[in-house]
Amino acid sequence: MKLDNYISFAIVNGFFLGLVLAILKFDAPEMIVIWTFFVTVGLYLLVLLSASFFMLFFDYNSKRLNKKRHDSTLEYFVHEFDKREKVVDKVREFIRSMELGANDEEAEATSGKPKKA
């Protein structure tokens, strides 16, 4: 999740958490608004501080995406899936031919006459 999305998500959660806590604690509407604001700002500052420490200690250069390696790996898997799909198609054709052969044998056994090919 991107850092901006994380902070926005935390703000929304802080608002609803503050609203719930304020409604449970206070009866006066102005106190509910004030405490909702304080809890939202407090959670925002806490998340902003933790995100700042995360950015301080996180090394982006070691976590970069190696696009060429991932593309070659994905191409390998696509090739392997194509091979397996061909094998599955051959197995399905074999099963279908066996079912048709079994149906023909049943028809011959019930009618007593061999079918013409």
Image (cartoon, rainbow, N blue to C red):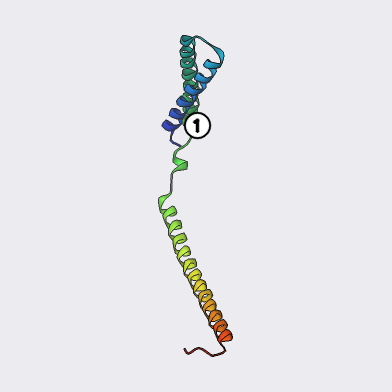
Q: Secondary structure at mark 1?
A: helix
Which residue occupies 53% across, 90% down?
A: 114
Which residue occupies 49% across, 26% down?
A: 13
User: Image height check: is 74 above or below 89?
Assistant: above
User: Image height check: is 39 above or below 80?
Assistant: above
Which residue occupies 44% across, 53% down?
A: 70
Return the x and y of residue 53 as percentages of the image width and height: 49, 27
Q: What residue would you read off at disc 1?
A: 57
Q: Label 1: how many residues lie within 10 Å, few (<14), some (14-19) or many (20+)?
A: few
Return the x and y of residue 60 as percentages of the image width and height: 45, 38
- At label 1, which amino acid type do we have? Phe
Return the x and y of residue 92 as percentages of the image width and height: 51, 71
Q: In the image as oriented, which residue stretches furthest toward the right?
A: 109
In the foreground, 61 or 26: 26
Return the x and y of residue 88 as percentages of the image width and height: 50, 69
In the foreground, 35 or 84: 35
